[in-house]
Amino acid sequence: MYLSSTEQAWLDGEGGPALKRAMEIIVALGNIYHAERLIPIKSVQISGVSYRNLGAAGLDFLRRWAAEGAQVRVPTTLNPTAMDMTDWAAQNFSPDFAQKQQAVVDAFAQMGVGAGAPIPTCAPYLIGNRPEPGDHIAWAESSAISFANSVLGAWTNREGGPGAIAAALTGRTAAYGLHLAANRRATLYVEVSAQPRTIADYSALGAWVGKRAGKHVPYFAGLALERDEALWQDKLKALGAAMAATGAVALYHVEGVTPEALAGPVLAPNPSHLVVDNFTPGYTMLSDDVEAIDLIWVGCPHASLAEIERVAGVLKGKHVQIPLWVTCARPLKEAAIAQSFASVIEAAGGHIFADACMAIAPLRKLGFEAVATPSAKGAFYLRNLAGVAARFGSLAQCVEAALTGRWPEGG
Amino acid sequence: MGEKAEPRVILEARIIKAGTAEGEALVSPEPIGFLGGVDGETGIVTEKGHPLERQCVAGKILVFPTGKGSTVGSYVLYQLAINAIAPAAIINTDSEPIVAVGAIISDIPMVDQIPIGHIHTGDWVRVEGAQVWIWSDKP
């Protein structure tokens, strides 16, 4: 692999130990994937932030890298934490866990992530980290990768935690995979004949297609979605997140909607075919057969203001019997407070938590065993990572479950 | 200190993490996933039915085809390193990002792209930069 004189100098340690380690990671990844060179990137999204997943070793490593003088060279945003960084006591986290989770965020802040004041979120594109079409970026967080590649038309591979940090410290990534135009063409033609309506329907569609798509690049034809209709980005956010959870889809195209599909032909020769005439199986494949529900979770990926407004609309005048938590980026919680959506949700007994992601939280330690959510990605990771039972259904079903503590009949 | 016996084989590998290390080989014919597969506190392989199950990786030249499993596995290698029970070096047929990143952040010398069939458990192996020296017994 070709390295510029600057890159070689960094690899040789002339930029200090933190930069040397970052270059070693970037070069190793480039060699593994047979990249010919490195390319400059415009932004980074870092994953691997929950203390539950990192543990003492992960925290120790981040602290060491920061202490070696690691500093990001490009705008860098941070994935969610396990808890709301200020309101964690209301979520039943212990002070000990909270202190360690804060230490993780502090290590990233020391590296200059979020300009020294990181705002944890899996939807950084809703709070200003919004790349332009054709920008090369190095993002981790599968749902954000999918949104950036597909909806925004930026170019990124699926980075891992330390790989994304290394990209941020060097401002570079290796040129392979989705940084090369030839790999961005659709290899799976998905013909949609049953129309999803709600955001949860798009999530169910994504769950079903993702399971079959694996690492393919899907092309959706026949989807009745317009770029100017309400919630179109929220629907695609849900679709992409689900495909990245049940499959390894990092990029998809939607006929007449996504930027690369609008710009010209995107189908590879001889794509595989898939017909979707019913997305109900997408709901059932991620639901456990549990009736008693003890938590409702909305906001996977982190909710947009429009999604928070919808939750407030459905909850208005009702009163929940079990916790109903909406997760989002902190600036959107503040906007929801300013626009009175938060007061409606709280009057109904629900709560908006910033920063947090329930899939990476120690849910059983918090006292939860069965969680309902209108997100396929949420249900997938609740079952496979958080280790609790899950129900995946419409927002209306989830709110009904919140009012009774039981999953609705026939749901 | 006499001169070392001639190695049985010398192979030229690709460097993933540059360094020098020497030790007894522990060879797995199957991939290793570190998260859930190796105990970060003891260095013992815990994956049920794995060819190396109940063996300890500490201080070994750990030889296996490639990594597998969760990306958090990189941090298990780091945990082994801070507990001073990491492998002395890692040799893969084809490395993948989880183990490669784990070796880099943990300062474990690592190479790949050699036919690992030349190495048997119990061999004495020295990794020095891109070169892999193999003896049948400790020289």
Image (cartoon, coloured by chain):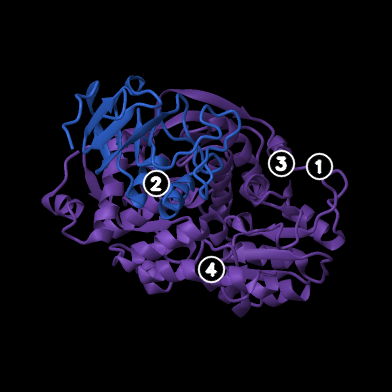
Chain colours: A purple, B blue
Q: Is residue A359 above or below residue A97?
A: above
For the residues beneath circles 1 and 3, the answer to whether they share a chain is: yes
Give the side of residue A167 with respect to residue A82, left or right. Answer: left
Observer-side mark, 1 or 3, equals 1
For the residues beneath circles 1 and 4, the answer to whether they share a chain is: yes
- Residue A191, given in percent of the width and then of the height, sits at 57, 30
Please name whichever residue, A375 or B130, is drawn nearer the observer in this view of the structure: B130
Observer-side mark, 4 or 3, equals 4
Q: Chain of mark 1?
A: A
Proximity of marks 4 and 2: CB atoms separated by less than 8 Å: no
Please name whichever residue, B29 or A207, is drawn nearer the observer in this view of the structure: B29
Real-space Cα separation, disc 1 to disc 3, in angstroms: 12 Å
- Residue A6, given in percent of the width and then of the height, sits at 14, 54
Q: Quadrant of residue B6?
A: top left
Which residue ends up furthest to the bottom in the rendered image?
A: A338
User: Disc 2 designates what residue?
Assistant: B102
Please name whichever residue, A39 or A335, is drawn nearer the observer in this view of the structure: A39
Q: Amino acid at mark 1?
A: Asp
User: Disc 1 designates what residue?
Assistant: A289
**Which mark is drawn over residue A277?**
none
